[in-house]
Image (cartoon, rainbow, N blue to C red):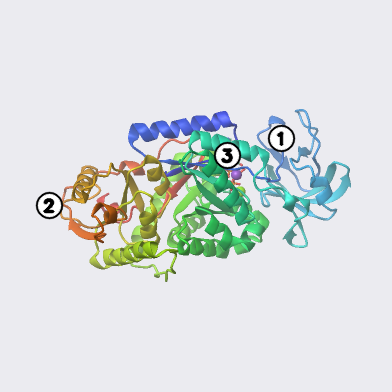
Amino acid sequence: MNVARLNMCHGDREWHQKVISSVRRLNEEKGYAVAVMMDTEGSEIHMGDLGGAPAAKAEDGEIWTFSVRSFEAPLPELTVHVNYEGFAEDVRVGDDLLVDGGMARFEVVEKLGPDVKCRCTDPGLLLPRANLTFWRDGSVVRAKNAMLPTITSKDWLDIDFGIAEGVDFIAVSFVKSAEVINHLKSYIAARSRGNDIAVIAKIESIDSLTNLEEIIRASDGAMVARGDLGAQIPLEQVPSIQQKIVKLCRQLNKPVVVASQLLESMIEYPIPTRAEVADVSEAVHQCADALMLSGESAMGRYPDKALSVLSSVSLRIERWWREEKHHEPLELEDVSSSFADKISEEICISAAKMANKLEVDAVFVYTKGGHMASLLSRCRPDCPIFAFTNSTSMRRRLNLQWGLIPFRLTFSDDMESNLNRTFSLLKARGMIKPGDLVIALSDMLQSIQDGQRLTVSVRRCPGPRSINACASRPRCRLRPQPCSASSTAIRCGALGSATRWW
Ligand SMILES: Nc1ncnc2c1ncn2[C@@H]1O[C@H](COP(=O)(O)OP(=O)(O)O)[C@@H](O)[C@H]1O
Ligand SMILES: C=C(OP(=O)(O)O)C(=O)O
Ligand SMILES: [K+]
Ligand SMILES: [Mg+2]
């Protein structure tokens, strides 16, 4: 895994703090760079805790009470609490009430003050804190519920917690506009004392689709949060919207995560369905930056298996796609706003083209702010990109982006020494071998080399060549790491040519 997501809908801060400490400890002990992403709860409408019961079964035709009243455990029979006070006002008799996007369905039959009586029309299992949406005439109802804030007072406390803990990413649930992203970014800038936290917009509501481009422009990345998205729009629209968001993010040079239900059946079974494997394959083929598990690793029976399946399927698809040269090149539009940036952008485009044409074994990029690495990742070259940065937090952050294998390196003013040290570092890890052809580029060379625009160089890895130099040493970053009850994301694209070493 490359990123651990903490979903603030579940667990308390103390619990999340323990997960963060475990990730930190593993990073230190094993030299990993697993990043932490905190994910806000937002104003989602959901059921209560079912009075401590793990689940409740709703049968066809049963009349259930959905109430905004609070109850002492145990709950009265066939009754659930709803967390949103305006619920009874917003719904109308005849509305459809969907639990978890349709895992169970009810029809509203009567309203009695704070209580709403509903008849079960699709029987199913109700899980604690399950999401609720109500539908009228084929669309999700947007009444007073649409006015709820994107970041609630509880979310602000969670965000303060995230800043204090030094998380790497904050993912904002149910984003409706770019303003909320801008607001959060200034809030973070004022409080995090130079420790930049990237803000990821979760695309999972109708409003986020209406304002898609401005939201993504304002954010440092996006997540196609298909769980809630599929509960807000007709399901058949989700695949095309996923494709559109992934493409748009690449055009705008923002990392994009495809999330939810990738291997859903592995919550219960040790192997995925064929359809799930095809879904993973599609996301990899679309060149998404990262794929995210949720229930599979948060509460499933096979969290580590699910992660290995996600990793091995992605590896296989990437290898196939590279060997067969299956990808259609995407015409990249300009992203740079200044001339200096434009130079970096053009260098990256040329370097990626060169890497593919010369069939080099790797690209090295030396970057302090991460910009050059992300511009290179955007070109999706056919080889791994080893990114060297002088900060551990930037290293973790780069871990989300397609194709980047980030390392921390104390930069010296002498670029030759930087290069030699990185050759040694990667040789020692079996990631390159003597004789390998490498393209090195940097967004620091300009200042180091006193104005010379020497930013791209083609090298061979020094040392005696030996065919078996890197034989069969599995790379430690691919071993699944323990991660109880949080979501996990893996980054795509970094592993292609490395797989032949297995
Ligand atoms: N920290 C946690 N502790 C216990 N259960 C969790 C935790 N995180 C997630 N879960 C369980 O895993 C399911 C799927 O996780 P996720 O997609 O993150 O949440 P949700 O379904 O609420 O959006 C949740 O519905 C919940 O039952
Ligand atoms: C990733 C998602 O958000 P969450 O799991 O927080 O509901 C989703 O809805 O797909
Ligand atoms: K959430
Ligand atoms: Mg969601």
Quick check: can you spot residue 372?
Answer: yes
- SS label for mark 3: helix
Q: CA distance from mark 1 to mark 3?
A: 27 Å
Residue type at tag 1: Leu
Q: Work out whether mark 3 precedes mark 2 in sequence or the reverse, and give the earlier one.
A: 3
Residue contact between numbered discs 2 and 1, judged by CB atoms under 8 Å: no
Q: Residues within 10 Å of mark 3 (few under 14, many from 20)?
A: many
The residue beneath circle 2 is 465
Badge 2 residue CB within 8 Å of ligand 2: no
Q: Nearer the viewer, residue 46 or 199?
A: 199
Residue contact between numbered discs 3 and 2, judged by CB atoms under 8 Å: no
Q: CA distance from mark 3 to mark 2?
A: 51 Å
The residue beneath circle 3 is 159
Q: Residues within 10 Å of mark 1 (few under 14, many from 20)?
A: many
Badge 3 residue CB within 8 Å of ligand 3: no
**22 in relation to 383, above or below:** above
Q: Nearer the viewer, residue 109 or 448?
A: 448
Query: Toward which corner of the image does residue 239 lie, by quadrant?
Result: bottom right
Residue at position x 17%, y 53% from top?
Answer: 461
Which dot, 3 or 2, sits closer to the camera?
3
* Residue 273 position in % (x across, y down): 50, 53
